[in-house]
Amino acid sequence: MSISSTSSIGSDYSRIAAGVPSINNELAAEILRNDFNIGAVALRRLPGETDCNFYACDGAGSEYVLKIAPKDELAAVKLQQLALEETQTKDAELPVPRVIRSTQNDPQVLIGTGQGTYVARVLTWRHGESLSNIPLRSDELLADIGHQAGKLAAAMAETADDGECPRHYWDLRNAHSVIDAGISHITEPELRDSVQYAQSLAMATVNDFDLLPQSLVHHDLNALNILVERTQNRNRVSGIIDFGDVTRTARVSDLAILVASVSRGQTDPLRTAEILTRSYAESVPLTESEVEALFPLVLLRTAQVLVTTERLAAEKKPGDGRHRSSAIKEQLTSLARLSQPYFTAVLRRASGYSPLPGASETIGHIRKNRLHALIAGELQTLNLSASSPVFDDADASKPSTLAEAAHRAVEELKPSIAVRPYGEPSFLIPALRADGIQQAVNTPLGLSFFVGNGTSVFAPADGTIVGSKKPNTVTIRHEPGNDVVFWTRITNVNPSMRIGDAVTAGQIIGHSAQGADASDFLTQAVTAQLLTVDPTEIDVPFEVRRDELPIWSQFSPDPTQLSGGVIGEWQPTLPKALEGRKKYLPETHPTYFEQPINMVRAKDCYFYDEESRAYLDALNNVTLLGHCHPRLTKAASTQLKRLNTNSRFVYDALTEYTEALTKTLPNGLDVVYMLNSGSESNDLALRMARHITGRQDFVIIDDAYHGYTSLVSDVSPSRYKYYGKPDFTHATLNPDRYRGKFGYEDPDAGAHYAQHTIDLFDELIAKGRPPAAFIYEPLLAGGGQVVLPPGYLAAIQAAAKERGILTISDEVQVGFGRLGEAMWGFQTQGPEVVPDFVTMGKAMGNGFPVAAMVTTRENSRRFDENGRFFATYGGNPVASAVALELLHILRDEGLQENALHVGEYFRQQLWTLAERHPLIGDVRGQGFYSGVEFVLDRETKDPAIEETLKICDRLKDRGMLVYPTGRYWNILKLKPPMTFTRQNADTFVQVLDEVLERGW
Ligand code: PMP
């Protein structure tokens, strides 16, 4: 063993435990002046492990760091200075400090003081925040760290030192002796076990340390030595500092130290390690032995730092207090719990190697050769993912109801045998964590056969029974030839064979052996896995996180063959659905998000995709009552079963509904045209206005969207911008108080914007083109979630009336109480505001297609001159029943009130984020209709377009659904179901905060 003895690190330990030389500011200033010709106007002490460090700034604003070490450090200091100067020469873009040579042109100078002799040197100061102060790290930042570390390693590798390297306390070759010397200070048993596990795991690696590629390395790439600069929400490495531990050793040490430090305190250390390794390996391709060494060394380094800091603390030695992080204990125990083979496989893939050597050959063999079915009988796939109809009547928030539903499905499939497929994203565990954020989804790495007790289990291929770690488990080793070896592991069987017995394909090897406890039926199924690694040596779980499947599948591949080829691997349908859309839908048909989601069910404020992931819905104003409200689905299905026809027949639901609806509107608005979509209702209102007034022109608000028929496209700037504005359409200013001419600070903004519209009316009249109607949304949706300023509609309406112009309130987005203050959006502008036409759709049926246009009897009669009105589906019995039940639920559940209070609370919470995130320029809205506007600069209000899309994508990745809107697509449109709770608002705000903080 080439491990140093405990005593050999004694002097190294005293070096790091000695504290730093005591130099005062006067002396530091003198050194700077006399030896480096720097007149410091500001000077301040900085922390350090062996050096006494000062920050200095001269009169010209140039910034430096002065480092003073004991004379014994001379050789080490020379090496550091050499490494710094050489790496600079090799790669001028590296963010490392520059060496400032002395007045004598030396990289370092010896200084004699009354207390002794010291070695002093000056480096340029690098700006940035220490990575240790940035706990939320984006993938982009991690990739940049790996990238810069790799570039540094590549430059260091070419540094021609004289090979005289001082010995080093932190060298991983010393780790065993460091640990032995300090382990007595670790008293917690689990922590001690973890330290010892780290030692044993790394033993072989350390023994062969000298066989690994050697290089001069920085050797202290810890988070304290990595500086980060933040521009808005973009974090990048701005400095790699402190070359105090430079040494010549195994090159991979640098990456191991980096991974150990940067992954500390991170929720997913393996992911951190993977990103760092991938980007590092782009500059320094790793050998396979280096990749294999990484996990043991990361663990060893963590143990070494832990033991050292505990020892320094126990002995009350100074050391570098910044290392004393409580996260290190947690890090060591959680690293020790990770699967080393899995970790290494991930890092192998990140370094460009196959994850598991030899696995693909074994998997290829398994695919090509038939296996005997494990269980006889008719097998049927039992899908237990979110897409399964099994869960239609279960409650996703109550796992017991899900398990019961699954159990019922097993029973219903009898006499066929239900088999749960490999790779299926399980919907059986709660999809949400306690804080309302989506939980990682699990998946089985094998098949589960739901068979009764005593069912015969057959050997899938010739082989030998080997030992199993768990009871009621049979493991067979198969060696079909050509150097291929694989294993079958079957659980919940009573074996009829002994270890060492030879078996032939199709021979009975045991019988199923589960109890009859229904509540636990899932864990009692006979499970079967194929394994490419020896299960007596490597633990391969039966269930893993679904995102880990690509790597785990190398250890435990698709075992379809164990079902006689009947139960195939679970496959997502998203790719096929997207292909189908491409083929059969118009090419401009949009999808949300760059990586679209295949939603398979929803309940209240949560969606579930086919991969069983949950998403909080902050986007769907259509589902006013929350998704799949049980009363509403019941009303729809009951009516659908009973009668569905057209309104030339007479049925009660239609008149009950129209009566109930008109009761919510001001007197006079009492004739209802039952329709099918928002576009249709606006189209009809515009057409009626033309007929009644005999005029052709319309005034609209700029940036509006009113629908897709030809007439409404002609009044929708976001549509006609593609084919040219019709000359009968005239856009007035968007009354946007954030960006527009009249701002929030102007109490008369409403009057000013209204005047602009009235002036337009007059201009048109003067031109001989008096408008037929003014169409508006009471809160502008496509226009950017703009709240109308007070007094705006009342002034316009009065002017319109005087000029014979009709008004249309498009309530398609905001009607039905969404704005909280009133049932209808126009009512929030004052009681005097009563439009001639009210159009509605979307939320009217909570997603069921039903729409309406309401007007006065007088208007209706005038239109009758034009012939009768009839729409086949308009107001059909199912649509009427659904719409009526919606009004009842809205009232019974007090949802308008909820919109008022929770909506206001939501905006308040969003405003608190604005204090910390300058990207947020404005938060506005009414009730449950809000917008968060992102800007690159609060002064110029330059829209943050790319950032907004990115934010939506990241929110989606964390299970929060929202999308951009507005002219620049830089505004989050927040319009959740009206059952949205304060807790939902808190969850959303928490995740948005994290997304902004983490940056990109
Ligand atoms: N008006 C407004 C304000 C809308 O937002 C929309 C749809 N986004 C429509 C009308 C058209 O409604 P539909 O898609 O139901 O035709």
Image (cartoon, grey):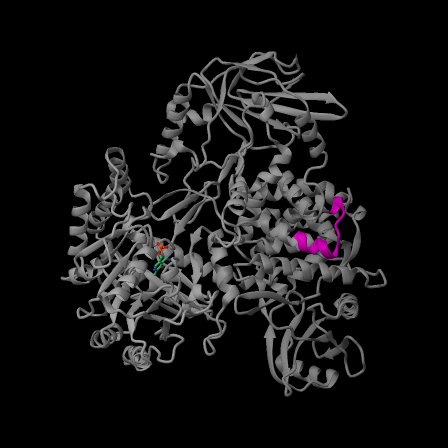
Q: Which image quadrant: the C terminus?
A: bottom right
Q: Tell me if residue 351 comes above or below residue 985 in the rendering.
A: above
| Front residue of this view, candidates 696 and 45 | 696
Q: Tell me if residue 543 comes above or below residue 135 in the rendering.
A: above
Q: Residue at x 45, y 35 (%)?
A: 385
Q: Residue 284: say if magenta.
A: yes
Quadrant assignment, res 24: bottom right
Quadrant assignment, res 976: bottom left
Q: Residue 792: say if magenta.
A: no
Q: Residue at x 57, y 18 (%)?
A: 374
| Front residue of this view, candidates 149 and 416 | 416
**Residue at the extreme right of the image, as rendered:** 162
| Front residue of this view, candidates 392 and 285 | 392
Residue 483, image x, y percentages = 76, 26
Residue 287, image x, y percentages = 76, 47
| Front residue of this view, candidates 889 and 217 | 889
Residue 713, image x, y percentages = 40, 62
Q: Tell me if residue 152 comes above or below residue 545 in the rendering.
A: below
Q: Please state the extent of the stretch shown in magenta in the rendering.
A: 277-290
Q: Residue at x 69, y 54 (%)?
A: 255
Q: Is residue 810 visible?
A: no
Q: Quadrant of ligand 1?
A: bottom left
Quadrant assignment, res 634: top left
Position of residue 864 in the picture relative to residue 605 (left or right)? left
